Amino acid sequence: MELAVLHSALVSDSPDGELELSPPILRLLEGVERSLESPNSRRAYRTSLLHFFGWCRAQSSVTTFSRMAVLQYKDSLVAAGELQEDGRLERRYAPATVNQRLAAVRALAQEAADQGLISPTEAAGIQRVRGEKSQASRTGMWVGKAQLDRILRIPDRKTLRGKRDFAMLAVLFSTGLRRSELVGLPVAALRQQDGQWGLIDLVGKGGKLRSVPLPLWVKDAIYDWLGATRIVQGFMFRSISRHRRLGAVQMSDESVKLILSHYTVTENLGGFRPHDARRTCARLLRASDAALEDIKELLGHSSIQTTERYLGKTDAFKRAITNAIAEPSHTV
């Protein structure tokens, strides 16, 4: 595909300084978005492709959408930054950002091929552009059972907010739900199946369905919250105003992070994230003898390798299942 198409599509700016895309480019962008099931992925790919289109506009020497053009784009991402006084380059884009943007460009190449704008051979060449290897990565945090018990004792379960927070923390740590899954939980998901209480037919990442068993103490914590608020349908967890009024819409993903941080900071766990609660769940289950395949299914991972990364390469963790995460002692 001639990048002249991109250049002509991007020659004008809107009054607010944003790129204005022509119909051919919009069709490509919309095609890429349609291929993605997750709203978060659609937003991330759109942002990445708008960045790529802007880069194309600024490159007078790049005339075709090819493997070479994408390699130049990758080099520009890696080299972007500021040179410090000590001679060290302070990078603008982390390896994860570089790789996400390249993934979006690969998807663009596939869509361009599907629309007949480039040949399958050209698309394959672009898709062979490798991402950048990360020199270091966040290993993540997790807590042991004793520390988890202390965290779960903190919410004041005599208050409405405490009931909600305890139930949300209980679900997070015992089931390993993603925060988007937690805030999107409908009341109808809480029911029995084959004599086991659980969250049934959850819609997870990539639109995949799974059912998650619940320990009885977690089910009781949810019922305590639902009974106090008389919520019988819609979203299970709601925001609470200063005047004890319940929100009617879905809580934000960020609210889960804030609630979790509020309770974990007392354990000197600054920066503890919802994904760390997910990691904690996986490690506690493995330590109690759950099969690796069971943990994979519980977390909704697409591959066993992802589950293994959560657990880490250590012999200290055995095998477990959700009921192994017992109710914390001395809870109110």
Image: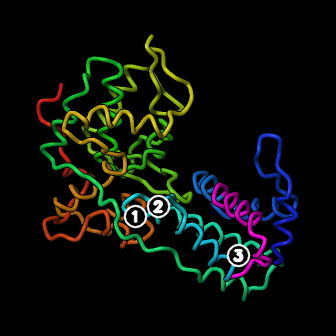
Instruction: Tell which circle, 2 or 1, labels the residue nearer the N-terminal end.
Output: 2
Q: Is residue 195 magenta?
A: no
Residue farthest to the top?
243
Q: In which quarter of the image is the C terminus?
A: top left
Q: What residue type is labelled 2?
A: Leu
As helix, strand or loop, the secondary structure at mark 3 comes to: helix
Residue at numbered disc 2: 83
Q: Name the residue under label 1.
A: 88
Dot 2: few (<14), some (14–19), or many (≥20) neighbours within 10 Å? few
Residue displayed at 61% across by 51% down: 39
Helix, strand or loop at mark 2: strand
Residue drawn where x is 28% and y is 47% of the image: 174
Q: What residue type is labelled 3?
A: Gln
Identify the disc placed on residue 187.
none
Residue 161 lies, with reference to residue 293, above or below; the image says above
Residue 55 included in the magenta stretch of the image: yes
Determine whether 257 is above or below 107 in the image. above
Instruction: Spot the residue most to the bottom.
Output: 121
Residue 17, quarter of the rendered image: top right
Assign a secondary structure to mark 1.
Answer: loop
How far is the residue under mark 2 from the one under mark 1? Answer: 6 Å
Quadrant where the N terminus is found in the figure: bottom right
Segment tinted magenta in the rendering: 46-67
Three-letter amino acid code of the residue under disc 1: Arg
Q: Who comes first in sequence, dot 3 or dot 1?
A: 1
What residue would you read off at disc 3? Answer: 110
**N-terminal of the two: label 2 or label 3?**
2
Q: State the CA–CA distance, disc 3 to disc 1.
A: 37 Å
Which is nearer the eye, 156 or 44? 44
Q: Nearer the viewer, mark 3 or mark 1?
A: 1
- 241 to 111, vertically: above or below: above
